[in-house]
């Protein structure tokens, strides 16, 4: 399979290594300093483009791929609120293909399944208050993380009494705190911490006056995330439309 990489930071380099190990060919690498290569013959020869950039560039990158009839796998987050409906609509009826996930890790996928089941079990236990916290490295631009938003939406869909999620406090690398964890009773608070070079941790807590129930996913490295992204590209190569991690586990 011919793969184009969009974004060549730590994630891009790791994806390149894993893709080659799995027998694929990297035909084009596009980063901030060679945007003209979207029109290159090398890019147009790609079967799938794997995109890992920023909340501010992902939307334009996806559109450029669609305009050139290239399938896209992206783990970029932060663009869905303003552009998600438009992009997802473009994938209807197989007109374009996008495999999107806020996190390609198998462990995170299974963690969200556990999150859903726990939310169903706790839905009638009104003495417990659910909360979420995510911890990521200091370079992550969006807060809360896309994975945290996915987890929050899954919880809300399965827990009676929470109708929406609210961005809570953000603890910055220097220890200062922005925002507040105050919320309405029907809002799920999602707080964020930015520190060091940690790959990512997501914690879901149900707390009463007497005890606390907590589930946590802690990534040891980006390796699982990277492998999942390449597997997603392999799946997108032979499928069409809007694809998600659920497609891999039917």
Image: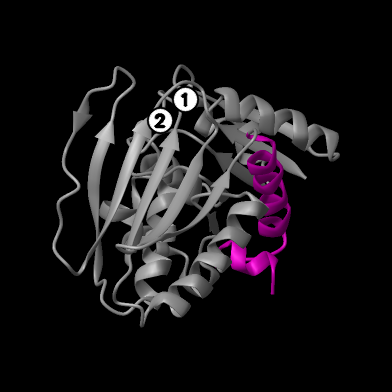
C-alpha separation, residue under disc 1 versus residue under disc 2 = 26 Å
Residue matched to label 2: 140
Q: Residue 9 in magenta? A: no
Can residue 143 be spotted in the picture? Answer: no
Q: Which mark is residue 36?
A: 1
In terms of secondary structure, where does tag 1 sit? helix
Q: Which of 168 and 227 is in front in this view?
A: 168
Is 124 above or below relative to 183?
below
Point out residue 71 in the picture as x, y percentages from the top left corner. Answer: 58, 52
Give neighbour class at mark 1: few <14, some 14-19, many 20+ (Cα, 10 Å).
Answer: few
Q: Is residue 80 left or right of residue 23?
A: left
Can residue 246 be spotted in the picture? Answer: yes
User: What colour scheme governs how the chains and residues are painted in the rendered image of this protein?
Assistant: one colour
Q: Do the residues labelled 1 and 2 touch (CB within 8 Å)?
A: no
**Residue ID at (63%, 49%):** 105
First-in-chain label (1 vs 2):
1
């Amino acid at each position: 399979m011919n793969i184009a990489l969009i974004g060549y930071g730590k994630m891009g380099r790791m994806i390149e290594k894993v893709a080659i190990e799995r027998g694929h060919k990297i035909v084009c690498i596009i980063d901030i300093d060679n945007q003209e290569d979207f029109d290159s013959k090398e890019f147009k020869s790609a079967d799938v483009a794997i995109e890992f950039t920023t909340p501010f560039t992902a939307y334009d990158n996806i559109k450029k791929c669609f305009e050139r009839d290239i399938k896209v796998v992206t783990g970029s987050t932060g663009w869905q609120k303003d552009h998600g409906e438009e992009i997802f609509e473009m994938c209807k009826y197989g007109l374009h293909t996008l495999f999107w996930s806020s996190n390609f890790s198998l462990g995170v996928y299974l963690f969200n399944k556990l999150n859903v089941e726990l939310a169903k079990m706790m839905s009638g236990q009104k003495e417990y208050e659910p909360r979420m916290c995510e911890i990521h490295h200091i370079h992550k631009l969006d807060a809360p993380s896309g994975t945290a938003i996915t987890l929050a939406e899954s919880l809300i869909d399965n827990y009676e009494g929470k109708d929406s999620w609210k961005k809570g406090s953000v603890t910055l690398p220097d220890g200062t705190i922005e925002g507040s964890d105050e919320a309405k009773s029907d809002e799920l608070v999602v707080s964020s911490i930015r520190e060091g070079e940690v790959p990512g941790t997501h914690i879901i807590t149900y707390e009463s006056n007497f005890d606390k129930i907590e589930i946590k996913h802690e990534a040891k490295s980006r390796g699982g995330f990277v492998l999942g992204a390449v597997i997603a590209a392999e799946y997108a190569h032979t499928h069409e439309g809007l694809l998600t991690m659920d497609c891999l586990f039917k």
